[in-house]
Image: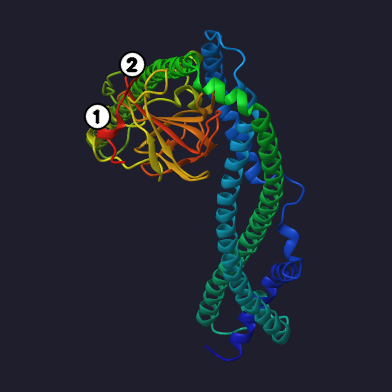
Amino acid sequence: MSHSVIPRWRAALQRAALPLLLPLLLSLTLPAAQGAVFGKATERSKQKAAAEAERAGLQQKLSALKKDISKTESAKDDAADTLAESEQAISEANRALRELAQEQDATNVRLQQLSGEHERLAQVVGQQKQQLARLLREQYVAGNEDRIKLLLSGDNPNRINRDLQLMAYVSQAQARLLDSLRANLKAVETNQADAENAKEELQEIAQEQIQQKQRLEQEKSRRATLLANLSKKLVSQRKEAGNLERDEQRMAGLVDKLNKLIQEQAIAAAAEKKRQEQLAAARAEAKAKAEAEARAQARAAAAAEAERQRLARANGGKATSKPAEEPKVVQQKPVEAVKPPPREEAAARPADIALAPAAPAGAFASLKGQLRPPVNGKLAARFGSKRGDGPSWKGVFIRASEGSEVRAVAAGRVVFSDWLRGFGNLIIVDHGGQYMSIYGNNETLLKRIGELVKPGDAIASAGNSGGQEESGLYFELRHQGAAFDPASWIKF
């Protein structure tokens, strides 16, 4: 290739790319915040609202269950009830602070990742910017030659064709460069928007933390005042045998109703699974029938074409407009479309089956003697021991400092997380096979209804809610609604 030809095709290519290069270079000088999104709700706010909406249905069912239990009680003037609202608020504020701290850590990690990605993208865009700037400089130096002049130059046609092909290859390479630059600029804008959103989320979290801390301090002060005023009444009511018996009946009633609700939802979940499997099988069968019909029609069409070609050869190589006899194609019935499920058979909502067992029936029973204590502390009351003149203990009380982490003894699903008279802030975990573990008198409930937990997960923090004299954890194990001694399952 002659030296005089090279500048001509390069100049033509560069001039053709010039209208595309200038806007891209100008766009690089725009402010970096151009791609950020302002004045809109953050993704965190949207996800939080959706999660609250999903929990509302299940919470409504359990609230109705609590009211149903309370209707059967004769005791209406329990001093611990005066503490209920304050103790619930303290629990919610502490849980919110813990969740906000976790969100803050996760958002900071995401912000660091976005920052690293932004630096990488900025480096790539900078390199591409230099490449485009170099092309513009070469365009300015090369002049105004184009393809028409190259064709009219009178040069060797073979050489001209080779030069034009080379120009086409270089044009394609530069087009890819332009596409890549556009994609990277878009990625920079998206990255900036995500980073801005993460920063706004951190500001939201910080503001919520301040609010929750203020609320926590107010509620703790309020509870301390109430305790001082109710101290004598709480002590006397705590020792009344009638109150203790009602507490036991209340717990038994709650567990029985929860078991019933769990079984109903387990049946609903199994029915929904079966329906989905039947629907999937029907769709697969319909698809197989459609594919079989398509293959049959393709074979029939191929046979018809082969017959036409045979007739054409028999007529001396001339194709006939109409064969003497068309091959018969077996007509098949059209495949029936799968009918969509009626509205009442639509997929069950998560809240409708949120309490379905999370573990196989025999999983918990196999853990006998292997469970770890739910909290670090000293055993103050054992299962079966007498409680003054009242009924014997149906569980154990473990003395522990306020705020100590209470951990799930085994995997399961939270089926109750609320305040209950006699037990304060109470959390119940279903382990499948009608086994439940019960954790009462907590300061804070860290898990919500329907959440799955693993062995050792922190689900609450110890306290003295519900009118308990000393800080600690009341713990029970139940099977089919009946309490049994945890000592043979857990080494205290």
Position of 75 with respect to 11 (left or right) is left
Label 2, secondary structure: give it: loop
- Mark 2 belongs to which amino acid? Lys
Based on the displayed image, in which of its 4 quarters is residue 358 positioned? Answer: top left
Q: Which colour scheme is used?
A: rainbow
- Residue 298 relative to residue 366: left or right: right
Name the one closer to the observer, 26 or 491.
491
Whichever of labels 2 and 1 marks the residue nearer the N terminus, that label is: 2
Q: Who's the residue at 60% across and 53% down the image? A: 104
- Position of residue 46 relative to residue 329, above or below, is below
Residue 362, disc: 1
Among all residues in the image, which is located at the extreme bottom? 3
Q: Which of 320 and 420 is in front in this view?
A: 420
Q: Position of residue 290 (x, y in %)?
A: 34, 26
For the residue labelled by badge 1, is the local secondary structure a helix, a strand or a loop? loop
Residue 12 in the image, given as x and y percentages of width and height: 66, 77
Rendered-image quadrant of the C terminus: top left
Name which residue type carries label 1.
Gly
On the image, the x and y values in percent for residue 359 come to 32, 32
Label 2 sits on residue? 333
Residue 300, percent across and down?
Answer: 28, 28
Q: How crowded is mark 1: few (under 14 residues within 10 Å), some or many (20 or more)?
A: few
Can residue 301 be seen in the rendering of this structure? no
Q: Could you tell me if residue 124 is visible in this image?
A: yes
- The residue carrying pointer 2 sits among few (fewer than 14), some (14 to 19) or many (20 or more) residues within 10 Å by Cα, namely few
| Residue depicted at x 53% and y 35% | 464
Q: Which residue is drawn at 62% across and 71% down?
A: 122
Instruction: Please determine whether, in this image, residue 468 is positioned above or below residue 348.
Output: below
Report, in whole angstroms, how far the alpha carbon at label 2 lies from the one at label 1: 50 Å
Choose between 360 and 491: the one closer to the eye.
491
Frontmost of labels 2 and 1 is: 1
